[in-house]
Image (cartoon, grey):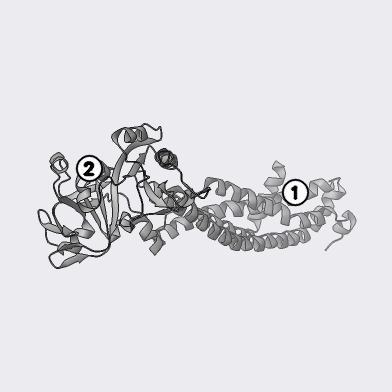
Amino acid sequence: MIENIRLSFQGIFSHKMRSFLTMLGIIIGIAAIIAIVSTIKGTNDEIKNSLVGSGDNVVKVNITQSGMEVNITDGIDLTKLPIIDDSMLQTIKSYDSVQDAAIYHKASSYEGINHSTNQLSGSYIYGCTNDFIRLMSYKIREGRLFTEKDFTDFRKVVILDSNTAYALFMGEDPINKTIEISGKPFVVVGVVDKDEDFQPIITSIDDWYTYFGDENSGTIIVPDTIWPILYTYDEPYQVLVKANSTEEMQDAGKKTQDYLNSFIKSTSVNGESDDEDSVKYKSEDILQKAKDLQKLQNSTSTQLIWIASISLLVGGIGVMNIMLVSVTERTREIGLKKAIGARKSAILGQFLTEASVLTSLGGILGVITGIALAYFISNVAEVPVAISVPATIISVLFSMVIGIVFGLIPSIKAANLNPIDALRYE
């Protein structure tokens, strides 16, 4: 075997240009596959980090009906939902997968928020504590967060996100100025922004709403104690859960969802359950969003890999062609070896080894080219890249298999040559 490998390298380097052109199809095919797999893997990792690994690992457990989040202003009956007290919140925090949790109210408002002549159309109003603001990774840009007296004295104060502040005040300093929410005056005490360390990749309008839907529409935060002034008393809270890690987000959300729903009594009409249409808590399945996007990316990459594999087929045919030429050129050598006792298996092994070494070299060069190409695409197109070690190893092994498969016919032809005819060959 070692002697066959040595002879293979000797034959390859004695015809450098011919060998390189033969390997070119393999190099291009392997390089294309490595670049595609690395780019897709990098994109998938970025999707996961953007959706569920933004640094806060938080999951919202929302009030839903028929699986869709409800808006409390729609007049939906929420009386069957439990009022989440401190003991229930502590139970949620005690779960192994949960690091912290906060409760909050949320409502969509399409009118009734204005300052002077400026009116905000389409926004989300949150009634919460500072814990919610902290878990949502909001950072104070101007002013302050809520104080204890804001809650105990039922002060009508408000914190705006930067989008809302700009829409209402058009660049003016909003601190200590008044806005109206449903005709009631609120004093602006702070302006917040999302943590700038989290910068997801946005490739479509769906991505924009997935990441920044609430913030894009405008976010207004008031103390939860004054929520009844705007809406109703004893309105059920929603829950924001922070998991210990990205991998535990789904578990943390589901445990919280199941715990809260255990307080809801199922109802029936004419003996038939209406649980599917009932109002209940449901956690955001962010991991499923990531999986769906990754599945789409993987489907695209599979198609591209099949296209790139065509060049491997062409490269394999090139290997077969050059090996047939090699057999023809070395007919007398083969005849001489068989005349002095070389067996068919030895001749077969020599040419199969040469074909395998040729394509393996092409595979290695293809991997190097593919990695370089992946980083080039990453720099030019500004897309993430992650080199897949398994794909790299499989690519080299696959190139070796191509050599064996496409080198088989020339090798069999060489092994079956008649020694007398081979020695007389001119």
Give the side of residue 102 with respect to residue 288, left or right.
left
User: Residue furthest toward the front?
Assistant: 270
Give the side of residue 165 with respect to residue 31, left or right.
left
Please determine whether, in this image, residue 245 is positioned above or below residue 47.
Answer: above
Residue under the image location 63 percent in, 48 percent down: 397
Q: Residues within 10 Å of mark 2 (few under 14, many from 20)?
A: some
Judging by the rendered image, the residue that carries numbered circle 2 is 130
Q: Name the kind of residue labelled 1 in the image.
A: Gln
Give the side of residue 111 with respect to residue 400, left or right.
left
The reply to whether dot 1 and dot 2 touch (C-beta < 8 Å) is no
Residue 355 in view, yes or no = no
Q: Residues within 10 Å of mark 1 (few under 14, many from 20)?
A: many
Where, by quadrant of the figure, is residue 80 drawn? top left
Callout 1 secondary element: helix
Judging by the rendered image, the residue that carries numbered circle 1 is 350
Give residue 298's position: percent from left, percent from top: 53, 56
Residue in front for this viewpoint, 167 or 239: 239
Give residue 26's position: percent from left, percent from top: 61, 58
User: Residue furthest toward the left?
Assistant: 176
Q: Name the kind of residue labelled 2 in the image.
A: Asn
Residue under the image location 16 percent in, 66 percent down: 118
Give the side of residue 363 with respect to residue 380, left or right.
right
